[in-house]
Image: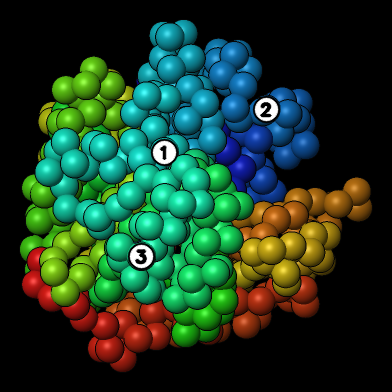
């Protein structure tokens, strides 16, 4: 085999974005995405001649991502020499361990290392041990300890479900009763001090020892314009950040990523994959809000189109402990904006089955990633999830990328969809700045 045959596990916008970037790498012979979605099916058909609806596609679509044995069997059948696990659920369930145990190269952390996302309390333990700056917090298992913690910090209250919650387990509120109700509903929570200042997502690819940063991005967590309404998985993103301090990446690597990776290695559970640091640039300096054990969605959709280095080459180096042999990643001197088109009702109860007109907008500057789509019995594109499409635009300036993304979003015929109108708006207007020095 001359190049890489990659199996990407997952079916969302992140996996379609990963597959799209992998397909651009000349070192990659073929990319399969399983279970995949209509976007990854079209990519495989157009780029690699994998027949849409053919037997390979059917086997890909049949995969249960959290079934490690099934992932291994599919990878072997496809003769994949690199497995990339996209979402957190299979990582926390130990699918990467099963893949590695079968002798396959895998980009994605072990279950033990993925606990950094799977348990808020574990993440706090790692940060304390590694001296990583984060919000002070209490671990609360009952109403009395939750009440005490809320009293200790005062409003606004931050109450986090201890386990995985797909970006929706956190309530930030000044309403004490609502904070207590969320704690009661979750059972076990982490209650922490409120962090002021803008948020940044900084991702690093690591082989467990050496780490390489990606460009910083900003995500928009709330469902509505001006950060109104409930938290979501993320409604849009842009990259890089024109307002970020010049040493943001270096400071984050030195004070956050490197010590965390070293701490996990020292515990005998090295982290191999993508370590996502959610940061707040507060009045008291840089603080970690959370770690994730996988690429962020939708930040990835804005970051990867700017990557010049071949993504398959980077993943393969990380999966095989050879990241140090690879120089720093290189980037196009451009900027990208992602606008998420969601289904009405998201995040509570998104309506599914809404018709989406084709063709979707496509140009040199704009492409559309599928996040939650499906084809109905008649082969028509319909919505099948909360976040449905990600419109991605790339341009020389942030203001141009933003205009292109919104122009394209406005052309999508999806009557049951909606999107935020203010993605990257404040950044373009120069209205964002860190609350203090790093
Ligand atoms: P998490 O799941 O920990 O990323 O939290 C989701 C969102 O809740 C974050 O992106 C923040 O917008 C908000 N959040 C979480 N923790 C805090 C905090 N300590 N202070 C302020 N906002 C927070
Ligand atoms: N965009 C936030 C996340 O992926 O968790």
Give 113 or 131, whichever is nearer the viewer. 131
Farthest-out residue, top:
102
Mark 2 residue crowding within 10 angstroms, few (<14) / some (14–19) / many (20+): many
Q: Does residue 204 lie above or below 307 as drawn?
A: above
Mark 1 residue crowding within 10 angstroms, few (<14) / some (14–19) / many (20+): some
**Are the residues tagged 2 and 1 within 8 Å (C-beta)?**
no
- Name the residue located 47 percent from the left edge and 16 percent from the top edge: 99
- Name the residue located 24 percent from the left edge and 55 percent from the top edge: 136
Q: CA distance from mark 3 to mark 1?
A: 24 Å
Q: CA distance from mark 2 to mark 1?
A: 26 Å
Mark 3 residue crowding within 10 angstroms, few (<14) / some (14–19) / many (20+): few
Is residue 12 visible in the rendered image? The answer is: yes
Q: CA distance from mark 3 to mark 2?
A: 47 Å
According to the picture, the residue beneath numbered tag 3 turns out to be 151
**Are the residues tagged 3 and 2 within 8 Å (C-beta)?**
no
According to the picture, the residue beneath numbered tag 2 turns out to be 63
Mark 3 vs mark 1: which is more N-terminal? 1
Give 194 or 382, whichever is nearer the viewer. 194
Is residue 311 visible in the rendered image? The answer is: no
Image quarter where the N terminus lies is: top left
Q: Secondary structure at mark 3?
A: helix
Is 306 on the left or on the right of 233, as rendered?
left
The image position of residue 207, as x and y in percent, is 24, 29
According to the picture, the residue beneath numbered tag 1 turns out to be 119
The image position of residue 118, as x and y in percent, is 44, 37
- Name the residue located 28 percent from the left edge and 21 percent from the top edge: 269
Image quarter where the C terminus lies is: bottom left
Ligand 1 neighbours mark 3 (CB distance < 8 Å): no
Q: Secondary structure at mark 2?
A: loop
Is 324 on the left or on the right of 277, as rendered?
left
Give 219 or 19, whichever is nearer the viewer. 219
């Amino acid at each position: 085999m001359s190049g890489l045959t990659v199996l990407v596990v997952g079916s969302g916008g992140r996996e379609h974005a990963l597959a799209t970037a992998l397909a651009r790498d000349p070192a990659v012979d073929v990319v399969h995405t399983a279970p995949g979605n209509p976007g990854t099916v079209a990519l495989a058909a157009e780029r690699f001649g994998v027949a849409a609806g053919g037997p390979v596609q059917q086997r890909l679509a049949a995969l249960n991502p959290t079934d490690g044995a099934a992932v291994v069997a599919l990878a072997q059948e496809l003769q994949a020499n690199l497995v990339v696990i996209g979402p957190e659920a299979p990582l926390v369930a130990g699918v990467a361990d099963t893949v590695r145990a079968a002798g396959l190269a895998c980009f994605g952390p072990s279950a033990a290392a993925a606990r950094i996302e799977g348990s808020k309390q574990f993440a706090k333990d790692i940060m304390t041990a590694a001296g990583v700056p984060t919000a002070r917090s209490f671990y609360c298992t009952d109403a009395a300890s939750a009440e005490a913690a809320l009293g200790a910090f005062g409003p606004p209250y931050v109450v986090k479900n201890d386990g995985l919650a797909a970006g929706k387990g956190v309530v930030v509120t000044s309403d004490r009763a609502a904070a207590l109700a969320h704690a009661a509903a979750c059972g076990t929570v982490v209650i922490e001090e409120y962090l002021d200042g803008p948020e940044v997502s900084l991702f690093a690819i690591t082989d467990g020892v050496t780490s390489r940063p990606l460009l910083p991005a900003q995500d928009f967590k709330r469902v509505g314009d001006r950060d109104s309404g409930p938290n979501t998985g993320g409604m849009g993103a842009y990259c890089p950040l024109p307002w970020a301090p010049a040493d943001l990446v270096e400071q984050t690597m030195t004070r956050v990523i490197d010590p965390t990776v070293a701490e996990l290695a020292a515990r005998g559970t090295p982290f191999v994959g993508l370590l996502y640091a959610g940061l707040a640039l507060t009045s008291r300096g840089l603080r970690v809000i959370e770690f994730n054990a996988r690429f962020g969605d939708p930040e990835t959709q804005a970051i990867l189109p700017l990557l010049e280095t071949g993504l398959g080459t980077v993943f393969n180096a990380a999966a095989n402990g050879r990241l140090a042999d690879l120089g720093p990643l290189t980037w196009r001197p451009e900027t990208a904006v992602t606008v998420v088109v969601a289904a009405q009702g998201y995040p509570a109860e998104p309506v599914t089955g809404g018709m989406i007109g084709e063709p979707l907008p496509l140009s040199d500057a704009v492409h559309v990633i599928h996040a939650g789509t499906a084809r109905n019995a008649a082969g028509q594109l319909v919505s099948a999830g909360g976040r449905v499409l990600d419109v991605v635009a790339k341009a020389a300036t942030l203001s141009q990328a933003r205009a292109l993304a919104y122009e394209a979003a406005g052309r999508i015929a999806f009557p049951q969809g909606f999107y935020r109108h203010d993605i990257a708006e404040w950044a373009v207007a120069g209205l964002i700045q860190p609350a203090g020095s790093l």
